[in-house]
Image (cartoon, grey):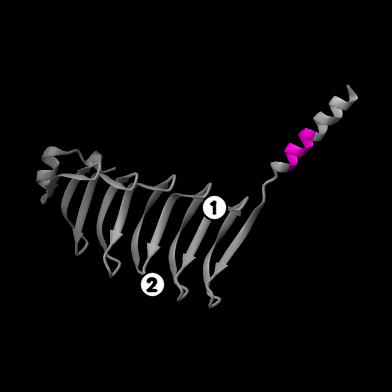
Amino acid sequence: MIYKLSMLLFFVSFLHSEVKTTTKYHKEFYKTGVLKAEGWLKNNIKTGYWKYYYKNGVISEQGHYKNGKRENYWYFYTTNNIPTREGNFKNDKMISWWHFYDDKGVLNHKCQLENNIKNGYCLKYKNEKLTAAVKYSKGKRIKEWTSFSSFRKENKLSDLQ
């Protein structure tokens, strides 16, 4: 009986020691010594907020991880620190509204995505003014409207939320 109890205690303490989590702040560098990436690791898996850098030191992207996968809102930039796109991830997949910018960092279009594919509406802009709306279903283009009034005749504004 004592043998069984001592074996049980040993096994439970062994399992408990295996469950320990280690969280640490991690940095990676290019061969030149310039910072390449920084963020949190939990048991050597990316978690929390991370930043990635180009070789010139400018941020290339930044956002959150959960269990090693991109999660929540992320931002992406050019080597000149101009925004290229931003939006939400869930389980490493682009979801919900994403904003896409031209080479000057001006909003070009925004689209509803699901699992990295256009699914819903894309709104096109020129000179920061809405010029068209396009509807997609699982990546396939369904219809395009080039005037707000024609869009409203067939759609609800609440569809754009």
Residue type, label 2: Thr
Label 2: which residue?
Answer: 79
Residue 26, position as x, y percentages in the image: 60, 61
Which residue appears at 64% of the width and 56% of the height? 24
Distance between the Cα atoms at labels 2 and 1? 24 Å
Q: Which residue is drawn at the image coordinates 76% and 39% (left, top)?
A: 14
x, y (%) of residue 2?
90, 25
Q: Is residue 5 left or right of residue 61?
A: right
Which residue is nearer to you in this view: 107 or 59? Answer: 59
> Is label 1 in a helix, a strand or a loop?
strand
Position in image of residue 60 (x %, y %): 42, 66
Q: Which amino acid lies under the numbered mark 1 shown in the image of this protein?
A: Gly
- Residue 142 image offset from top left, x and y in percent: 15, 42
Residue 16: in magenta span = yes
Q: Residue 117 colored magenta?
A: no
* Magenta region, residue range: 11-17
Q: Quadrant of residue 58?
A: bottom left
Q: State the residue position of label 1.
A: 48
